[in-house]
Amino acid sequence: MGRRSRRKKRNPASKLTDDLIVEILSRLPVKSLCRFKSVSSRWNGLISDPVHRRRLPQTLDGLFYDTSSPRRFPIEARHFTGLWERRRPFPDPPLICPSFSFIPDYDNISLTDSCNGLLLCRRAKNDFGEFCYVVCNPATESWVVLPDSSAGGRVRNVRLGFDPADSPHFYVFEFEFFGRGVEIYSSQTGAWSHKESKWYHYRGMSGEESSVFFNGLLHIVTVQFQCMLAAVDVVGETWLTISLPEYVGEMNARDPGFVGQYHGQLCYITQGDCETHMSIWVLEDYAAEDWTLKHRVSVQPLTEKIIPRTSSYHIVTIHPHCNWILFTAGWDQTLVAYNVDRGEVHVIRNLGSDSLTPCIPYVPLYSGSLTDGH
């Protein structure tokens, strides 16, 4: 009997051209796209290629953070860390340079906030503390300088609002002391407008509170006797104050929690030095202020295997397409990912004891352009 010839089974996908594979991948949801990076080095290269990224759906790619050390010059430095380099067999190439060298006078840029692919920065004008706001898109290296607000370059609590699924325009909210009013910049009009506060009493804001732009309103955690969720729309006409779950508001009056999106709904997550549990609450009814507890887990088991003898943690963000909560813990600011579905904890990296808060999440945006930008 003759030997049977052994023929290797050919992979049909190997005959597909790169352009055809990218076209197929562009029709997949983000979650599937992330998994397919591990299929082969070829697929990972196609998905990670900066040119192809413009055609593919994007998700949370990494975080910006600053460090401060008197042993170097300049004392402060900005960094960018990807989320899953250590877990992927084929790590992505660096997406962006955190120096923002495409912006003139980038050495004087400080990062303030981010929202759906856009970044809000302050750029120093001189050594006397005067500055201007710059909104930029690192993925397209476009940027726009905003005109001065009535604050005249004085530092205020400022936030960025942008939802490309709803509008191509972005908004900058600059709050007065104790939330007495707000200056709102609209990229549609190219001007600032001032609105007096309609909250039933002034809200305490230190500048480090968590916030999220959701359903056309900026929601921000405020502190005034107890934690409350305050919201204002992009034209300053709708002002809301939303009570947090009763015991959360009382216990966290000195340590505001995290507000964000969880499965497409507004959510609030407890955090801090005194918290023994991480609780995820979802607001299912605005009018009734109906909060539903979706998940609750003891904090110590999440941190003790990684950072012994600590239960202190600070929420950074919620992954928009995976059921992951990212938080920092410990003196060396270890960045940790908690898988809510599996109850698993994974260390991403140590940011270092000289790292500064907050960490700024970043999702690449390759579509659209900045009004009057560069």
Image (cartoon, grey):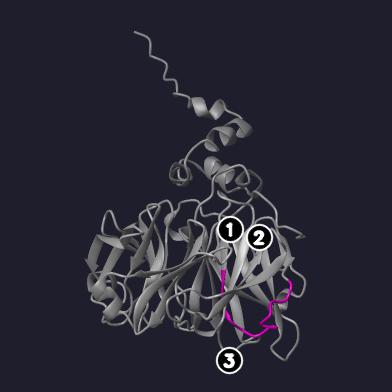
Question: Which of pointers 1 and 3 indicates the residue nearer the eye?
Answer: 1
Left/right placement of residue 357 relative to residue 309 reads right
Marks 1 and 3 close (CB-CB < 8 Å):
no
Q: Residue at x 36, y 62 (%)?
A: 267
Relative to 210, does residue 190 appear above or below in the rendering?
Answer: above
Between discs 1 and 2, the one toward the N terminus: 1
**What is the three-letter code of the residue carrying label 1?**
Gly
Quadrant of the rendered structure where residue 201 is? bottom left
- List x then y, in percent, for residue 209: 45, 76
Q: Work out whether 341 lies above or below 71.
A: above
Q: Which of disc 3 and disc 1 is earlier in sequence?
A: 3
Q: Is residue 299 magenta?
A: no
Question: Which structural element holds mark 3?
Answer: loop
Q: What residue would you read off at disc 3?
A: 70
Residue 264 vs 18, above or below: the answer is: below
Say above or below: 27 vs 61.
Answer: above
Magenta stretch, residue numbers:
147-159
* Tag 2 residue: 137
Is 229 positioned to the left or the right of 92 in the image? Answer: left
Q: Residues within 10 Å of mark 1 (few under 14, many from 20)?
A: many
Kindly identify the amino acid type of the residue bearing the numbered disc 2. Answer: Asn
> Do the residues under discs 1 and 2 have CB atoms within 8 angstroms?
yes
Q: Nearer the viewer, mark 2 or mark 3?
A: 2
Q: Position of residue 101 (x, y in %)?
A: 72, 68
Per the image, the residue denoted by label 1 is 117
Can residue 328 be seen in the rendering of this structure?
no
Q: Position of residue 97 (x, y in %)?
A: 65, 65
